[in-house]
Image: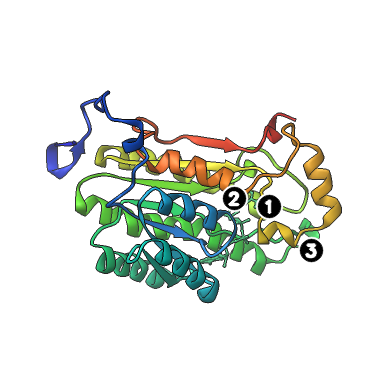
Amino acid sequence: MPAAGRAGILVFMAPPPADVPLRQLIDLSGRTAIVTGAAMGIGRGIAHRLHEAGANVVVADLDESAGGEVAAAFERGRAGSALALRVDVSDQGGVEAMVEETVERFGSLHILVNNAGIYPTAALAQLDVETFRRVLDINLTGLFLCTKAAAAQMIEQGDGGRIVNITSIDALHPSMVGLSHYDASKHGAWGFTRNIALELAPHGIAVNAIAPGGILTPGTGGMDEQMMRRFEAMIPMGRMGDPDDIGRAALFLASDLSTYITGAQLVVDGGRLLA
Ligand SMILES: NC(=O)c1ccc[n+]([C@@H]2O[C@H](COP(=O)([O-])OP(=O)(O)OC[C@H]3O[C@@H](n4cnc5c(N)ncnc54)[C@H](O)[C@@H]3O)[C@@H](O)[C@H]2O)c1
């Protein structure tokens, strides 16, 4: 347990006890997680693993009906364990209400996964300022707003927390032409992750990123078939990723399997960045 430090800041000085059984390290019972963009794709894969590990999960998404179906499936598995909220992560009022409603329903908030994001492709000559701003608004400003609202709640609770930001291999290296706006947003998300990790560490809040490579989701399903084949051919592990590949990594970063990691970016790309 953390010890109280100066000015209410928690200082996690003691190493974790060595005798905690493995099963307990991934047990999220009694914890509450918000996963943005959890109605489908990667967010849904992450929400599934966190819920399976025992967390109460808030499925926060623009798509109310798909989000409602995901939450209903969780509820069938464990009654009282899920809540669907319609939220646009780029809307400050909506994001603050999301955290308030989460706490009203489950009493506290321990885990935030900033996953909601968009990736429309456009070469520079076709890239209009509205699209540029929308991508930055959702992928970067949205991540900031959710982090701010969730961190305030975690700090008030005083027992730490976990924030996992879904960036992209594009936060490190461009994957294809036509994603300049997206790459700007994801580089920003990675820079934000590192600085906020520094700021929140004294509160026992770990902030990390996962950089997925090509993952098969409804979002990538709409992409040009030829482009996808070319992308796939450059993956050393020989396959596109599955949302559960990211779900497993997120469970690691959201659970007590990772007690001394903050400000890190876990690349989950089947080796794509090596090629
Ligand atoms: N799929 C990939 O290959 C891949 C690779 C690297 C990074 N990523 C990142 O992973 C995240 C999820 O990608 P995906 O492929 O699962 O996408 P997806 O399009 O399949 O699903 C995205 C979900 O986010 C929701 N959403 C969109 N805008 C929102 C907003 N303003 N507020 C709340 N919810 C919103 C959508 O309704 C949808 O349910 C994104 O941040 C994306 O940049 C994806």
Instruction: Indicate the position of residue 10 as horizontal and vertical percent values.
Output: 19, 39
Three-letter amino acid code at the position of disc 1: Leu
N-terminal-most mark, 3 or 2: 3
The residue lying at 71 percent from left, 66 percent from top is 128
> How many residues crowd around disc 2 within 10 Å: few (fewer than 14), some, or many (20 or more)?
many
Q: How is the image coloured?
A: rainbow
> Circle 3 is placed at which residue position?
126
| Mark 3, secondary structure of its residue | helix
Three-letter amino acid code at the position of disc 3: Gln
Real-space Cα distance between discs 3 and 2?
30 Å
Mark 2 close to ligand 1, CB under 8 Å:
yes
As displayed, is residue 34 above or below residue 162? below
- Residue 216 marker: 1
Q: Who is closer to the viewer here, 160 or 248?
A: 248
Instruction: Indicate the position of residue 247 as horizontal and vertical percent values.
Output: 52, 47
> Circle 2 is placed at which residue position?
243
